[in-house]
Image: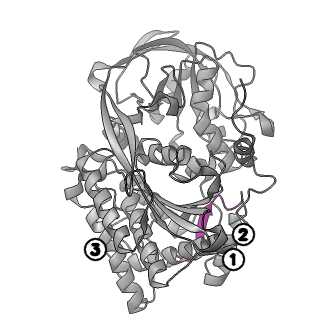
Amino acid sequence: MTLRRNTMALMLPFAVAAPAIAQDARGDAWWAHVAYLASDELEGREAGSPGHEKAVQYVIGQFQASGLKPMGEDGFRQPVALTEQRVLLDRSSATLIGPDGETALSIPADIIPGGRGGPPPAMVDAPLVFAGYGLHLPEVGYDDFAGLDLAGKIVVVISGGPASISGALKSHARSERGGWLAKQGAVGMIELVTPPQVEIPWDRRMALAPRAAMYFSDPAMRETSAPFFSAQFDPAKSAMLFAGSGQDFEKIAAAADASAAVPTFALATRLRASTATTQVERLSTNVVAMMPGKGKLAKEYVVLSAHIDGYGVGTPIKGDAIYNGALDNASGVASLIEIAKKLKADKARPRRSILFAIVTGEEKGLLGSRYFAKRPTVPKADIVADLNFDMALPIFKLTSVTPIGYDQSSLGKDAEAISAAMALPIVPDPFPNRNVFIRSDQYAFIREGIPALFFKYGFKAGTPEADVEKAWRANIYHSPFDDANQPVMPAETVKLNDYVAAVTMRVANAKARPAWNADSFFKRFADEAKAGPAKE
């Protein structure tokens, strides 16, 4: 097995048999794409940057070499107009006002104001209300906001959710709540994460705080039109918000960690905050290519997607300011390049056409995939499925797979069939409260009614693999150390690439198009798409 770089503390010594030479060569080819896309020359590939453009040109060249047809608006390109917004931390302020008076909050040490979605209000001064997990799911008999007065309030929510609700539903509710709260008259939201549920340590969140956010230049594409305040709060200091409420925050946090019921109530504190920002217009690019199908189904499309953007240049950590994004997500782009090569070498002639969508702006809120899914370069009704690659981590052996969303549509049966054939069993998402169902580009397609899968290496909680994965997220994820100088197992990714290629061909050649399961919550998006726009 090829193992890049000397072993680091986050890696564990897995005993692995040597793969076939051909598999090693294919792994090396995959890694060569990653190494270029994650090189310092491309400066982290931030959406709209010169480095991103170099990555786009590279991918177009690779797709041309594989004989794919251009399917963008301008050759292989689909332009996406974005507004880059930067919160000026040193010119912004926040004060917590409670029973004991005013407490100045440090930005970003205590609170980090957000800049996604659109311009925030220049000033907000509003009481706080605690809305538990912040999940609005009345369709399944659950609503944390029921009975709360939200108008004119800043809503405080905590991580986690009831164990009785699936991770997919909880993730969906979290993704929708900002826009929903704005429609109810709320003026902002503060998100809390309990210490055991922390994915990225607060000191690293502080390092990321100066990063620019982005939103669509076209207001019609945004979730909300009115300014809306959003912020993260230091997990170690969250109890400050509950002063004078008569509620014990530690007990609430413990209940959240146990996925138990948590109360909702008005807090005795309010927040006064001013947010200074700058905006710059950027033009970024999705890359869209096609392997044509044959026969009557050729005008239906299976989409393979991966995001090409990264975090760009940011706050230096140990002297390194380039957030190279090797496994997040040069790796996914490289996998799509290699899958295209494999299908060409296999002389594949799928019945349905296969679209390769390399999208921008995922790190800024799934912007490129949302743009493509809403304004595709083929008829939207003819897109039958999305199969998404993002941050599949080749840092331990691939012995099982987790296709996120496999329990929601008939695509799960396709994944199961290939799993059986390739001896790669499916295991459920081990950490459903991470919200991965909504955190990558497949969710943009799901919201348009298109069944989707999101491919991950499989592992179970409490295993050595889980420890390796958790350490990678804590130490490497969204940092300058996600570069080509980390230990990876390229030959293991070849297995996953072949698995996804096989699923793709099975879906592309099936007589029936994929369908949502009858009991899937997300079937509603397909039903809405068939019904057409709601009448005023």
Query: What amino acid does circle 1 point to?
Result: Ala
User: Which residue appears at 62% of the width and 52% of the height?
Assistant: 432
- Residue 449 to residue 271: above or below: below
Queried whether the magenta region covers residue 492, the answer comes back as no
Disc 1, disc 2: CB below 8 Å?
yes
Q: Nearer the viewer, residue 321 or 227?
A: 227
Using the image, tell me which numbered label, if any, was put on residue 417: 1
Give the residue drawn at x 49%, y 74%: 497
By secondary structure, the bulk of the magenta-drawn segment is best described as loop
Badge 1 density bin: few <14, some 14–19, many ≥20, Cα 10 Å: some
Residue toward you, 209 or 68: 68
Q: What separation in Å lies between label 3 and label 2 (alpha carbons)?
A: 40 Å
Mark-to-mark CA distance, 3 and 1: 37 Å
In depth, the one of 249 and 43 nearer the eye is 43
Whether residue 403 appears in magenta in the rendering, the answer is yes
Q: Which residue is mark 3?
A: 6
Range of magenta residues: 398-408
- x and y, in percent, of residue 109 in the image: 35, 30
Quarter of the image where one finds residue 150 = top right
Side of 147 where 119 appears, left or right: left
Three-letter amino acid code at the position of disc 2: Lys
Residue 396 at x, y percent in the picture? 46, 73
Q: Which residue shows up at 55% across the image and 43% down it?
A: 374
